[in-house]
Image (cartoon, rainbow, N blue to C red):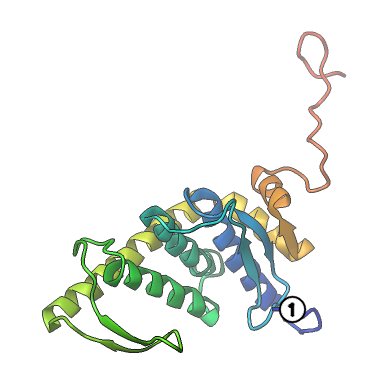
Amino acid sequence: GAERKSMVISDEEKKITAYHEAGHTMVGLKVPNIDPVHKVTIIPRGMALGVTMYLPEKDRLSASKEYLLGQIATAMGGRIAEDVFIGSITTGAANDIERATEVARAMVCEYGMSELGPLTFGKKEEQIFLGREIAQHRDYSEDTAIKIDEAVQKIVSEQYERAKTIIVENKEALIRLAEALLEYETLDSVQICRVVAGLPLDGTEPTPSATDDDGSPES
C-alpha cells in the first residue's frame, strides 16, 4: 500500500515496530535459499505499521522445500524479536503467523514435503470458468487429520526455533538495525548490510588510530 506518513504513532509503537521489522530482516539475512532483503521501513503502508521487502534475483517458477522453510523462519522473526527485546508480544505478528501456517499446511497437504510422505490431502473442487476454489472435501480419516496438524505444528515450531537462534546469536546487530530504523525510518539493502556490519551509513570507513613506525600510538 501507499505510505501513510500522516499516521500518528506513539514512540512505544515505533520502537516495537522497529524491532519487529529488524527481526524479519535479520532472519532474512541469515537464512539461505530465500529472496534477498531489499528494503525495510517502519513507515506505515496500508494496514501494516512496517514492512520488510524481499526482491527475487530471478523469476521463480517453483519453490524448493528449503525456500518454503526459510519463508516460515523469516515470518517468525518479527514475533521473536518483540519477545526477546520488548519483553512482550503484540497482535502485529498475526499476519506473519497466518502466512507461516498456510505455507506449512501447503507443504504437508499439497506438496508432499513432510514426514507423511508424497501424498496430498483434501480434494479440491473448482469452477473452471471462475478459476477459483469453491469447495474442499476432506478425503482422509480423523487419525490422519491429527497427523496433519502435528506435522504442520512441527514444521512451524522447528522454524520458530531456527529463527530464535539466529536472533539470539545476532543480538547486537539487531539492536543496531532497530536503532537505525528509529532514526532513518527506511533502509535499503546496502544500508542494512552496513548497519549489521557496524559501519556508518554515510559511506565512510572507520579511521584507524595513528601509530608510529614501531606500532606504538603517536604521542
Q: How far from the left and from the top, in percent, is residue 24? A: 55, 62
Q: How far from the left and from the top, in percent, is residue 138? A: 21, 85
Q: Quadrant of residue 205?
A: top right
Q: How far from the left and from the top, in percent, is residue 195? A: 69, 49
What kind of element bears circle 1? loop
Image quarter of the N terminus: bottom right
Query: Relative to 70, does residue 127 appear above or below in the rendering?
Result: below
Horizontal side of 201 relative to 154 (left or right) equals right
Q: Quadrant of residue 103?
A: bottom left
Most foreground residue, 145 or 211: 145
Horizontal side of 145 relative to 200 (left or right) equals left
Identify the residue shown where x is 28% and y is 66%: 154
Identify the residue shown where x is 73% and y is 51%: 191
Image quarter of the C terminus: top right
Q: How far from the left and from the top, in percent, is residue 28? A: 54, 55
User: What residue is pinned by disc 1?
Assistant: 2
Most foreground residue, 113 or 46: 113
Most foreground residue, 115 or 56: 56
Q: Is residue 89 visible?
A: no
Q: Can residue 115 be seen in this view?
A: yes
Q: Tell me the kind of residue under disc 1.
A: Ala
